[in-house]
Amino acid sequence: MSHLTICLIICVLTMVSYVLGKLPMGLTAMLSMVAFVLTGCLDPKTALSYFGNANGVMMLSMFVVAAGFNRTQFVKKCATSVNRIAKGSLTRVMFGYVVITALLAQFIQSSVIVYGIMAPMLIASCEELKIQPSKVLFPLAMMCIAPISTLPLGSGATQFAELNGYLQANDYTTYAVGLTDPMKARLPMMIFLALYCIFIAPKFAPDQPVVAMSGVESRQDRREALPPFQEKAGYVIFILTTLALIFQPQLKIQIWVICITGALAMVLFGVLKEKEAIGAINWPMAFLFVGALSMGGALTETGAGEVVGAVLANFANKLSSPYLIGFVFFIVPFLLTQVMMNRTVMIIFIPIAILACKAMGANPVGIIILVQVACLSSFMTPMATPAVPMCMASGGYDIKSLIKQSLIPAVILCLVAVFWIMTVFPLYA
């Protein structure tokens, strides 16, 4: 039996275990990682390196930064102000948080960071309105993930250059991506998702947490107010951390360094005690993230992505309808990015899309942006992106409730993306 076959079997068994929920997800993730290593699907050194992955360090650090920020009165004041403006309406509350989240996601190219900033305030708003955070935290997470870098602001201003780099690397420079092309393609999806998260998503969310909430501390569990110095320190540390993340490209400091510095500062200046900081970290979700990296690494090392990509390209060449071609190039990366890191899927599938278009003599601009949209729509499983495990911890979701909430927006997003992008950027002018 080949490593590829073994890898796929382990992936299927892992997914079944996640869905059945008989074992803790963190335990399932670690068992699958060990299985990948023992069967030769994953190099042991590579597996070990995932425990020090930059995204993982960033996620764990943001648990602490969020807990420190949530320990201050600033969160309560912000939540009270939002609720006063919203006049107790959950729809208005969601409107405010969704718009702010969408804007913040244009400047910070990390859904974990955006979620870590916005979740504590939304939780506090929910507590004042006496609404369970489980009703709103997954919609918030979707807005942190899918709309990132849609507008040509911050990191979004570099998207066209990155896509043109792929075209140049694959020697297909007949076409080029313009500065505003990614925005033209993705803006309708961002608007759709925002409207869905404001008006519809809370209706499909569980009324009560399915599992115990953790990771982002509840104000109801909090002790007395901090002393004035620690209170001010919490404000300053959080604001400086946020500003550093926004201007990270200019500062040229690794994102994980900024996050861990903010987390350490929360303890150093007494905003959190050492035990509080350690308790703020959701370790099962950390193990889940490492397991997700292991699955993605095994799929990459065994060549599963390339095999699927080659089949996809051959199949696309036989289709006559540009919309069917667009659908195929959306749905396959979309499904893979739920179990592999989106950056890995992009690296595999954008070149495949370019080469397929080159063989057909077609315009690749719409297709490669469609692949990008599919890869950034990674919100259906905890393996998709670090923000999802973080959301599961603070919202009290299991994988069943996660899939239930994400299925409808995923289907509609697919249809809207394929129809719009293949119409605005046709394969054949």
Image (cartoon, rainbow, N blue to C red):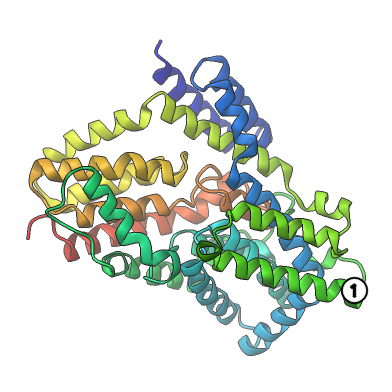
Above/below status of 313 relative to 143: above
Where is residue 149 shown, x and y percent of the image? 42, 64
149 displayed left or right of 55: left
Residue at image point 31% right, 31% down? 306
Residue at image point 86% right, 65% down? 222
Above/below status of 138 relative to 197: above
Residue 209 in sight? no
| Relative depth, front residue between 358 and 189 | 358
Residue 128 in sight? yes
Above/below status of 45 relative to 151: above
| Relative depth, front residue between 408 and 220 | 220
Where is residue 224 shown, x and y percent of the image? 92, 71
Residue at image point 45% right, 71% down? 194
Residue at the front extreme of this rendering = 251
Task: Please identify the quadrant where the C terminus is shown.
Answer: bottom left
Where is residue 30 shown, x and y percent of the image? 64, 29
Q: How dense is the environment of label 1, judged by Cα within 10 Å: few (below 14), some, or many (20 and up)?
A: few
